[in-house]
Amino acid sequence: MIENLLVEYKTFNEGLEFVRRAHNPYDDGAPVGGKLRGLLGESRVGKSWICQHYAAINPPIVAEDQELYKVVHMTISVRMTPLEFAQELNDLSGNPYSPMRGGWQSYVRRALLHLVEAGTELLILDDAQYLFFDRREDTIYDMFKLVKKILDTRVTNVLLVGEQRTDEFVQRMAPLKNRDYSAMPFKPLTSSAKDIEDFGKLLGSIDKRLPFAEPSGLRGLAEDMYRFSGGMVGIVMNIVQAAAAEGLNNNRSRILIEDFRYAVKTRVAVGDDYNYFGYKSR
């Protein structure tokens, strides 16, 4: 319950709406395929959280004796090969036992075509920067071709989710940029008065959903939470989850301040001597 806790907030809803529009820009119309979108920003700002939620509310459906995977959410790993890409794609789109006949290149081709057969309207590629960066130069073109071939079907839209540098690559590649490419920069909440107010509300909403008998007073910890996380919701949840585990393990009715001190103790950056939750690093 704690690990999968979902709280909607201002930027979450904005990002979710962008993903929905990447899937289908028409409220009551059929999706238009072959378009490229980007949801880009720093790590731990909540992009993957949004995409996982969108995939969860669009599960596979059975239609005319066929299982359709309209939304597929796939995470790219460092130095993933085209074969590994195809295997993951098959696993996620209901085709895990696809044979390797004809060699790996034929296998990859069939995996891409299977997206059409599975009725995939939106393919979300998370950690998309690893398609084009942190890999050998001669493999970048291979990954570029995979994305282009999927777009070439004109059935599936592709959403690249990852670091801002992903945008730099797409902007240099006309075959991708010209696929009606648009991107939303997804940023953490700022330190403005309005964002801090929203940040406090977010903490209050998280508090209400925690499995404790009493509220843990998260909203009152907003200053320390913001300073430690920089407004990045993923980091907030790391701290809340670690502190909640301590509270549960000690049979508490709520999370105590010492649980937050414990959570931050092993996560504070070297050289950061701020007194978070009353814990001062040494």
Image: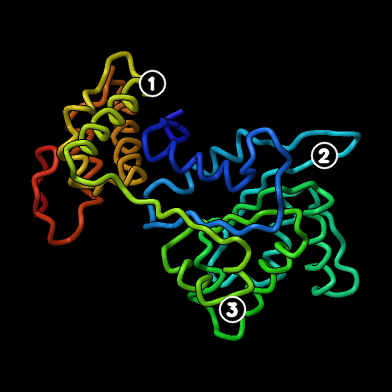
In the image, 84 versus 138, the foreground residue is 138
| Side of 44 relative to 282 (left or right) | right
| Side of 31 relative to 104 (left or right) | left
Mark pair 1, 3: CA separation: 46 Å
Picture quadrant where residue 164 is located: bottom left
Residue drawn where x is 68% and y is 69% of the image: 148
| Side of 91 relative to 201 (left or right) | right
The residue type indicated by label 2 comes to: Glu
Q: Residue under circle 3?
A: 140
Q: Residue under circle 1?
A: 211
Element class at badge 1: loop
Element class at badge 2: strand
| Percent x, y of residue 48 | 48, 48
| Percent x, y of residue 186 | 39, 51
The residue type indicated by label 1 comes to: Pro
Kindly identify which numbered label has been placed on residue 67.
2
Residue drawn where x is 26% and y is 35% of the image: 199
Give the label, 2 or 1, closer to the camera: 2
| Percent x, y of residue 219 | 21, 27
Which of pointers 2 and 1 lies earlier in the amino acid sequence?
2
In the image, 146 versus 194, the foreground residue is 194
Whether residues under marks 2 and 1 lie with C-beta atoms below 8 angstroms apart, the answer is no
Whether residues under marks 1 and 3 lie with C-beta atoms below 8 angstroms apart, the answer is no
The residue type indicated by label 3 comes to: Ile
